[in-house]
Image (cartoon, grey):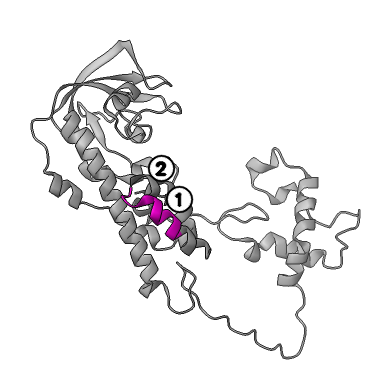
């Protein structure tokens, strides 16, 4: 899952004022210097502020942005700069009342994320949904079609309709078929934090599309009623398997396959129930055995309806 695989990546901060990386607008040295040089300037005045030009932007931006863009940017940030860098009133300022803490997941004021029963219950729903999806995958793909390490398949470059050009068909042996990579995370787009890339190799090569755009032809999926997310979609051009010539010589037990589960604890770690419900509701509704009932329940919890 992308959210787990990228957990150690540090995202660079970019200033929304000068667009330089490494700081935000509160600590922007250019905004502070420009405000102090123009603190008596009237933001509604047609007279341009002193020292504000396109040079404040990174070099690539300077090719497209003019001095007028820089002045408009300063004008829009003037009140903010005055609040942050202007003279503070003298005297004792009464402390702001401290707001009562809330659970970052469900919003309750009675507990925090560490002991949130709602969050624990949602993790269980995700695990059950993933297990239901994997059971469908096992029945149709591993047991029904015979895909796995050692399967001999016919494959080719699929067009936008998910069909292989008959003149460009190849045959090969599946050398990698990562069983842990199959689950509801495959349904998300490749840009999503919740995406899990499938890992399939034919003759030792990872073909384009096996990691994002499906790996079976549409005909093969519709013929056997496979989950449509396994098929090459009209939005992708990629390598797809169109026929299994010889099934894999061995297959895992269904009990073992259904016992594997991704780290859904990472999914809920820094996300709210509302955010996760908007991402997962369609998947839960479709694949969980009690999907319709759960949708209504979690919608009410997420939006306090």
Q: Is residue 269 above or below residue 178?
A: below
Q: Is residue 66 left or right of residue 176?
A: right
Q: Is residue 118 left or right of residue 182?
A: right
Q: Is residue 272 visible?
A: no
Asked if residue 291 lies in the magenta stretch, the reply is: yes
Secondary structure at numbered mark 2: loop
Residue projecting furthest to the top: 167
Q: Residue at x 67, y 63 (%)?
A: 29
Q: Nearer the viewer, residue 47 or 2?
A: 2
Q: Which quadrant would residue 38 be assigned to in this image?
A: bottom right
Q: Are marks 1 and 2 in contact (CB under 8 Å)?
A: yes
What x and y, as percent, mark residue 233? 41, 28
Q: Which quadrant would residue 74 be assigned to in this image?
A: bottom right
Mark 1, residue position:
279
Q: Which mark is residue 188?
A: 2
Q: Which residues are magenta?
A: 288-298
What x and y, as percent, mark residue 269? 39, 63
Q: Residue at x 34, y 36 (%)?
A: 211
Q: Residue at x 87, y 54 (%)?
A: 48
């Amino acid at each position: 899952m992308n959210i787990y695989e990228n957990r150690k990546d540090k995202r660079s901060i970019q200033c929304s004022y000068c667009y330089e990386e490494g700081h935000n607008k509160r600590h922007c040295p250019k905004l502070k210097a420009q405000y102090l040089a123009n603190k008596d300037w009237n933001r509604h005045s047609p007279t341009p502020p002193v020292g504000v030009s396109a040079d404040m932007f990174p070099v690539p931006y300077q090719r497209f942005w003019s001095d007028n863009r820089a002045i408009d940017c300063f004008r829009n940030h003037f009140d903010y700069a005055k609040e942050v860098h202007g003279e503070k009133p003298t005297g004792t300022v009464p402390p702001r009342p401290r707001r009562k803490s809330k659970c970052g997941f469900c919003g309750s004021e009675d507990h925090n994320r560490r002991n949130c029963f709602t969050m624990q219950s949602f993790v269980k729903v995700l695990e059950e949904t993933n297990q239901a999806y994997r059971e469908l995958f096992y029945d149709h793909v591993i047991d029904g079609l015979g895909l796995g390490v050692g399967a001999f398949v016919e494959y080719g470059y699929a067009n936008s309709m998910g069909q292989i050009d008959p003149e460009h068909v190849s045959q090969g042996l599946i050398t990698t078929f990562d069983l842990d990579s199959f689950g509801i995370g495959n349904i998300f787009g490749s840009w999503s934090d919740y995406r899990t890339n499938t890992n399939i190799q034919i003759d030792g090569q990872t073909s384009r599309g096996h990691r994002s755009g499906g790996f079976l032809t549409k005909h093969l999926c519709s013929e056997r009623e496979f989950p449509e997310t396994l098929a090459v979609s009209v939005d992708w051009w990629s390598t797809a398997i169109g026929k299994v010539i010889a099934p894999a010589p061995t297959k895992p037990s269904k009990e073992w396959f259904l016992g594997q589960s991704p780290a859904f604890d990472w999914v809920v770690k820094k996300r709210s129930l509302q955010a996760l419900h908007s991402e997962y509701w369609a998947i839960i509704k479709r694949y969980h055995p009690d999907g319709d009932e759960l949708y209504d329940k979690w919608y009410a919890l997420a939006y306090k309806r």
